[in-house]
Amino acid sequence: MVGRLRCRVKRQARARSTVVAGRNLYDTVSAALGTKDNVTTESLAEGILARDQRAIARGITLVENGSTEGLMLIRGLFGRGGRAQIVGVTGAPGVGKSTLVDCLTSEWRRRRRTVGILAIDPTSPFSGGAVLGDRIRMQSHAGDSGVYVRSMASRGHLGGLAQATNDATVILDAAGHDVVIVETVGVGQGEVDIARTADVSIVVMVPGAGDDVQAIKAGIMEIADIFVVNKADRDGADRAVSEIEAVMMLQAYEEGEWRPPVFKTEAAHGTGVTALLDAVEMFAERHDHDGDRMRSRAEVRLREALSHQFVSRLERHEEIRAAIEEAVQRITRRDVDPHTAAAEIMERSG
Ligand SMILES: Nc1nc2c(ncn2[C@@H]2O[C@H](COP(=O)(O)OP(=O)(O)OP(=O)(O)O)[C@@H](O)[C@H]2O)c(=O)[nH]1
Ligand SMILES: [Mg+2]
């Protein structure tokens, strides 16, 4: 199996070699990765398939940087995945997502499932300490080779946050994790896009978050498969549950269609987590072979990759880069709207 993968990676490297002007991409990758400690994308892929934690970490760094090496790695690994259950956990800063993820992980480990966790650090003023906090909260799984935890910055991804996260889930999936949990702060479009590509999306709220319930009407509602009211030890938990259910009453569900259940949890005390996890498993079972869902996720991923590659291709031309810069300034001055500016740039690109 590993041998076959190696061949495939080499073949793909040769195929790509014409793209990188004047250089064989395989050499480029080897040079980028291998001069110091002899690591190539093929040995990296082998390491990932063997669930070697260093290889996984390195692979995720490559895709995080949006590098060509990262793309090659995904190309080699994509066909080897598809078995993991991707679970999105989304919610406002501080609602207890990481604590909940920690509890879910413990429960999955009890059920002998391996777990990969990606915590997308929002680097927002609300939770500047998220990375450190997540590490501390996930400490309970330190030393357990069946759990891999990684924080990823939400800013500065060349190919966009959703793409970097998707690629990281491909790596954790190929590494053989049964479950891959992606924790995101559900505030930006990038995070919503991530949730759209998960197999099951859990939206976490807390009591007294009336505004959040308004927000779910605006967007998160469509991505939530399961709602959680965490910090149920606080006043108003039942009211929060009723508020969410009231919003759902406005939705029309067809006969037999999944109606998102609402769970109360106290993640800090591990309460309510087993029932939540049972619902996640039930949801997964029901939707495992849901062709529509699989198709729409594939489409989201393709469209994302396509728009990224399209823009990169445009930006290869010096004059287009200059035109983009000029357009940015004109939009800032409100001399032109973004749609017209984009149309003009398209026109120039032929
Ligand atoms: N009272 C109470 N506190 C909780 C509960 N669950 C988590 N917390 C606390 O809420 C705080 C935030 O928890 P986190 O798990 O870091 O929340 P988060 O949503 O991951 O936060 P960010 O990643 O920064 O957005 C911590 O101090 C937790 O101990 C709960 O059920 N009840
Ligand atoms: Mg967190």
Image: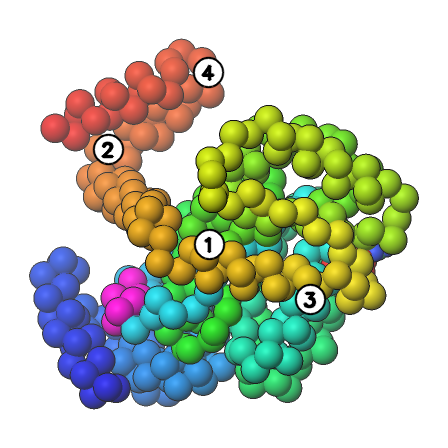
131 left or right, relative to 306 = right
Disc 2 crowd, CA 10 A, few/some/many (<14, 14-19, 20+) = some
Please report the residue visible at 45 percent of the width from the left and 57 percent of the height from the top: 286
Q: Which mark is residue 333?
A: 4
Amino acid on which disc 3 is placed: Thr
- Whichever of callouts 2 and 4 sits on the residue coming sooner in the sequence is 2
Q: Secondary structure at mark 4?
A: loop
Whole-number angstrom distance, CA of label 3 to CA of label 2 = 54 Å
Please name the residue that numbered disc 3 is placed on: 274
Please name the residue that numbered disc 1 is placed on: 198
Please name the residue that numbered disc 2 is placed on: 320
Is residue 74 a member of the stretch shown in magenta?
Answer: yes
Q: Which residues are magenta?
A: 71-79
Residue 97, above or below 306: below
Disc 4 crowd, CA 10 A, few/some/many (<14, 14-19, 20+) = few
196 left or right, relative to 140 = left
